[in-house]
Image: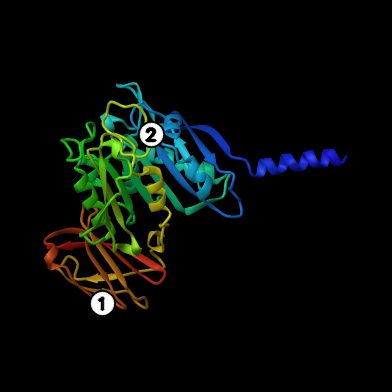
Amino acid sequence: MPLLILLIYVLITCEAGAQTTVNGSFVHGGITRTYSFYVPASYNPSRPAPLVFNLHGLGKDGADQAENRDFRPIADTAGFIVVHPDGSIQPLLQQRFWNYGSVAGSTVDDVGFIERVIDTISARYSINQKRIYSAGMSNGGFMSYYLACKSNRFAAVGSVTGSMSTDMYESCNPSHPTPTIHIHGTSDPLNPYNGNSSSKSIQAVTQFWINQNGCNTTPLVTAVPNSNTADNVTADRFVYSGGVNGHTVEHWRVNGGGHTWPGIKIFTLLGRTCMDFNAGQEMWRFFRQYELSSITVPVNPSTASLNLWPNPSSGAIALEAGDRVVNDVIITDVHGRVRERRTGSAILRLNLTHLGPGVYMGRFSGDGFLVMKKIVIL
């Protein structure tokens, strides 16, 4: 009997503290979609865990991403759950891909798929809904940005060797400011650092998210210690701080780097790999600073109202919020770029004449409320 009790105790202890990889699938949009996720031994249901998506590149799958761009050792010590979803098969190329819009005319709903994965995992495990992040390589990096554009579930996103397509850049209108970290080689042969006819330059992408987050446009620049001179590349880190809710945007420029994941040396014909830092570690260091803030919580229109007059106007606008006090205003243009940011103890008037004629979206918030209003300047 004592031996049986000991055996039961050992089995329960191992199960509670065991690393676990779970495979799953479901039908979404008429397609059977597959995914896996890794639960570290430190997972405790009483402490909701962060969730990190690790998205593969074109022609790869979740298993390849887990093997060759691995967040699992980081998850073991940091205590987050890491998800490796599989893209769908692109009919023309017969390769897995992420549909960040209508790639090659695709109608696959990858945003809905990934949000459903969040909900599926959340039904079984205790997930901190304010701490969900997406990292991606190449095509997966494009998809991470698309999630920031189209989903309200992500607190921060990161991209390695990805970018934003021209269509995504022009139509992106995020529901909330989203911190971003971007890592890219200047000699990337697939997604050129300076962009091409279908994707934006990395400078343009970085500037887009600087504007979105209301960050300072002058970065703090530091050279990454060249700890591995044999890789024949160096790196510089650009940090744009001072954004909404303390947000920052980071860009790691890998000088002479190719279409590769820094810190992981695998055979490739797509250029040099920087071994001076680990991309996964740096993305988690960046992600862990952020969670979804109160500005992202939808407000019932019946409980919060705001009057603007005149609207349309020449740019001089008065605000009336009843017994509420507006202390934060963010004005974005039709492309979702932040054009104006005001903070104060009680904002009663705006002068937006310098923005020029056009249609803008205003986010007006205060203690416990958020109101969105369209603004027309003649």
Please state which of residues 250 and 326 is positioned toward the viewer in this rendering. Answer: 250
Please state which of residues 17 and 146 is positioned toward the viewer in this rendering. Answer: 17
Asked if the residue under mark 1 is in contact with the one under mark 2, i.e. CB atoms within 8 Å, the reply is: no
For residue 117, above or below residue 303: above
Amino acid at the residue labelled 1: Leu
Instruction: Identify residue for label 2.
Output: 56
> Residue drawn 26% across and 77% down?
348
Other residues around mark 1 within 10 Å, as few (<14) / some (14–19) / many (≥20): some
For residue 127, above or below residue 20: below
Instruction: Identify residue for label 1.
Output: 348
Quarter occupied by the N terminus: top right
Q: Which mark is residue 115?
A: none
Quarter assignment of residue 347: bottom left
Quarter assignment of residue 23: top right
- Residue 81 vs residue 203: left or right? right
Q: Nearer the viewer, mark 2 or mark 1?
A: 2
Amino acid at the residue labelled 2: His
Quarter occupied by the C terminus: bottom left
